[in-house]
Amino acid sequence: MDAIAPTSHDSLPTDVRQGIGRKYLLPLYGVAVLIIATIFGALDRQMVVLLADPISKSLDLSDGQIGVLLGLGLTLCSGLAAVPLGWLADRYDRRKILAACLLLWAAATAGCGFADNFTEMLIAAAVMGLGESGVSPIVWGLIPQIVPERYRLLANGVFMLAANLGWGLGIWAAGVIVDNVDVLRPFLPFALQDIDPWRVAFVAVALPGPVIAVLLLLIRTYHQAASAAGEVEETIMTMRSYIRDHIHTLATVFVGIGFLMFGVAASTNWIPTLAARSFGVSTGEISAASGSAYFFGTLGGGAAYFIFGPMLRRKIGAGAAIWAYVITLAMASVMSVAVLFARSANDIFILFGLQYGTTIFASTFTPTLLQDMTPANLRSRVVGIAVTIGFSLSALGPLAVGTLSDQIAGVPDHIRIAVVVMSTGGLLMGSLLMFLGRKSFVRTVEASRPRMSQMSQ
C-alpha cells in the first residue's frame, strides 16, 4: 500500500489555505503589529519619565514643572484628543488613523530631544500625548474587526499583557539607550553628535516610527459572517440616547478606571525620581529595577488573569471585571502605603511590582469590559470618552504629587509622602466607584448586546 504523504498547506485547496490564513495568520499578524505599536508608544512615554531628573537638571526645572510636564503635558493631552479620534475611527479606516497618530508622536518624541526650555519641552510632550491618545480607542475598536468573536477575550488578554510587558521593556530599553548613547552618536548627523545624552536618546527612539506605521497599514480587517443558527442584528443606538440611558454606568465605571489611572500614575511617574533622590541609584540601575518590576508584576497579574479570570467569568458573568477592579485596587492601596516603610530602592521597586501586578489583573479585563458595554457603532467614541476621563484623572496624579512635594518641601522624605498619599487615595476611590457601579454595569451590557434573529428559510 502506498505511503500517505504528510499534508502541507501547499497541498490544501486554495480556499482552505485562504480560510486558515483568514482565521489564524491574519488576526495573529494584526494583533502582533498592534502590540508593537503600543510598545513603541510605551517606549517613547517612558523616555520622558525615566529622564525626568536629567531633563530637570539640564533645563533647570522645579518638581512642580516636572509634574506639569508628566501630567498636563504628557498625560492630559493623551485624553483630550481621544473622543475626536474615536469619532474618526468609527467612521473611517482605523488603520490609517492609527498610523497617522504614530507618525505624530514619533515626530514629537524627536522634538523632545531638541527642546531648550520648559515651554518647548511641554509643547513636544503635549503633541506626543495627542498622538498617543488614539491608541486605546482605535486599537480596542480594531481588535473585533481583525479577530473572530470566539477568540476576542483571549486576544484582548494577550494584547493587554503584551502591552503592559511593553511598558517594562520600554523603560528597560530606555535605560539601555541612555547608558549607550556613545554607540549611537556616530549614526547621528554631525551637528547632533555633541548634544546631551538624554537628547540623543529621544532622537534614537523616534526613528522606528515610519516603519511601524507601514506595518499598521498592512493589517487586514474583515466582517464577521452570520452564525449558522441565526444572523446578528446589531444594536444601534445614538450617542445621546446611550449616554442618557446609561449615565450611572458611565460615571461610576469610567471615573473608577480614571482613579485607578490616577493612583498608578502617581507612583509610576515618580518612583524613578524617588529612588534617585532618596537612595542615590543611577539611571541604569533605576531602569533595570523598574523594568523588572513592570515585567514580573505583569507576569504575575497576567497569570492570575488567565487562571482566575475565566473562573470569575463563569461564576459572576459580565460583572467579573467590576469585582476584579474592586478587590485588586483595594489590595494595591496596601502596597502603596507600605512604600512609607521601605528602607532601600530595592524595597520600593519590589512593592511597586506587587502594586502593579495586582492592578494588572483587573486592567487586563478593560478592553473586553468596554467592548461588552458598548454597541459596535459607538465603540471607538465610547472608548474615547473612557480614555479622556481616565487620562484626565491620570494627568492629575503626577501633577498632584509634584505640587504636594513642593508644598511640604521642608518635611523629610517629602517626595515619598506625596507619592503614597496620592497613589493610595486614587486606588481606594477607584475601588469604591467600581463597587457602586457593579449593578448598572450588568444592565448596560445586556442592553448593548447584539440581538439574534432567526435566518429566513
Image (cartoon, helix red, strand yellow):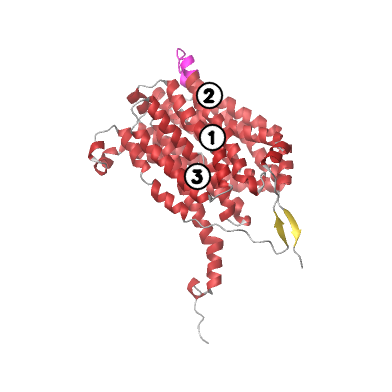
Q: Position of residue 127 (x, y in %)?
A: 44, 35
Specify the amino acid type for callout 1: Gly
Which residue is outermost to the left?
Answer: 190
Question: Residue 193 at x, y = what percent?
Answer: 24, 37
Q: In which quarter of the image is the C terminus?
A: bottom right
Q: Badge 2 is on which residue?
A: 420
Assess whether residue 414 is covered by the magenta stretch: yes
Residue farthest top in this picture: 410
Instruction: Report the residue marked by disc 1.
Output: 79
* Pointer 3 or 2: first along the chain: 3
State if disc 2 and disc 3 touch (CB < 8 Å).
no
How far separated are the C-alphas under marks 1 and 3?
18 Å
Q: Tag 2: residue type?
A: Val
392 displayed left or right of 197? right
Whether 99 is among the magenta residues is no
Label 2 sits on a secondary structure element that is: helix
Question: In percent of the image, x 32 and y 25: which residue is there?
Answer: 58
The image position of residue 220, as x and y in percent, is 52, 58
Pointer 1 with pointer 3, Cβ within 8 A: no
Q: Mark 3 points at which residue?
A: 163
Near mark 1 (Cα within 10 A), the count class, few <14, some 14-19 or many ≥20, is many
- Highlighted range, magenta: 404-415
**Label 1: element kind:** helix
